[in-house]
Amino acid sequence: MTPIDLVHLAALRDRTSGSPEVVVGLIDGPVAVDHPDLAKQNIRPIPGRFDGACQRASSTACLHGTFVAGILSAKRTSAAPAICPDCTLLIRSIFAETTRQGEMPTADPEELGQAILDCIDAGAHVVNVSAALAQPTTKGERTVEAALDYAAKRGVLVIVAAGNQGTLGSTAITRHPWALPVVAYNLHGRPTEHSNLGSSIGRRGIGAPGDGVTSLGAEGKPLTLGGTSAAAPFVTGAVALLRSEFPNASAGHVKLAVTQPPSRRRTSVVPPLLDAWASFQSLETTHQRRRSH
């Protein structure tokens, strides 16, 4: 069982590598944009507090950003999942490269809120947030909530990592009704013990591969990592492929297809596992595909 197989993504991935018209915003660390396995003709940093291109390939921020970018935008010939290499990827870095080796960087809530706004204003259709929130202030929470309100108004889906503290609860970003929180599942189809869970995550979230995921390493060799940061881009990539195939589907319809109708959910703090092929079939019954035009 591979991560791609776990969420029935292979058939959708075989149909399309995405469309350049579908724009994905990546809010993470900087990315090694000169990596030979990145489909870099479709990748561009957008201005922010931190540079979107790595200055130190060995930094935790660069390793993290490049790993997540590989899941989304690596060449299909690479070791990474390479879900939507032909989509356009915007890099909006929120992590400094000064974090000590092995220490996971965290996102300042106000910086995160601004990054979401920047991605939306730059044309993103879906935004991936594989970041842990630092302890938020009231002002910081309001900034994140306002950014997510803006995303909902603009029809931009925001996919967020649920977090890896093994806690039961929510944050300003995972509790927002428009955000789509992602829990990490292992290859046996069960949530990992470190994934955060909660009522809002169980009601509106989704599960994706977050154990034994291999993607690009900033220093050349592939990396195998896990956690909700690895799981979120599987959902983001699936959304990007669905938007590529069904350009006339609304963000709400795509979100519903990915998360499944509420009537199919049990009352639980654990969300169901993504089924990308079922999501495709759901949209196919109500929307014309791009290739049929």
Image (spheres, grey):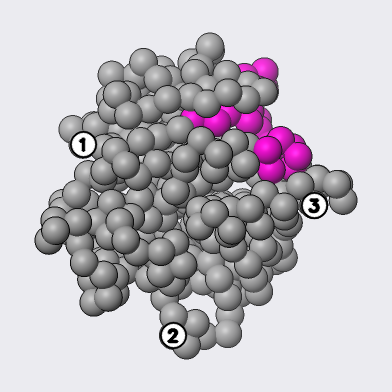
Q: Is residue 56 left or right of residue 187?
A: right
- Kindly indicate the quadrant of the structure image that contains residue 166: bottom right
Identify residue type, mark 3.
Arg
| Cβ–Cβ under 8 Å for marks 2 and 3 | no
Q: Residue at x 37, y 56 (%)?
A: 239
What residue did someone put label 3 on? 142
Identify residue type, mark 1.
Arg
Measured from the top left, where is residue 105 in percent x and y? 65, 32
Task: Look at the image and say whether residue 105 sits in the magenta stretch.
Answer: yes
| Cβ–Cβ under 8 Å for marks 2 and 1 | no
Position of the N terminus by quadrant: bottom left
Task: Look at the image and say whether residue 121 sits in the magenta stretch.
Answer: no
Sequence-wise, the earlier of marks 2 and 3 is 3
Spatial CA span between label 2 and label 3: 32 Å
Identify residue type, mark 2.
Arg
Q: Which residues are magenta?
A: 91-114
Measured from the top left, where is residue 263 in percent x and y? 47, 88
Sequence-wise, the earlier of marks 2 and 1 is 1
Q: Which mark is residue 76?
A: 1
Q: Nearer the viewer, residue 119 or 241?
A: 119
Q: Residue at x 50, y 57 (%)?
A: 155
Q: Residue at x 41, y 69 (%)?
A: 253
What residue did someone put label 2 on? 264
SS at mark 1?
Answer: loop
Q: Is residue 118 above or below residue 234?
A: above
Q: Is residue 50 visible?
A: yes
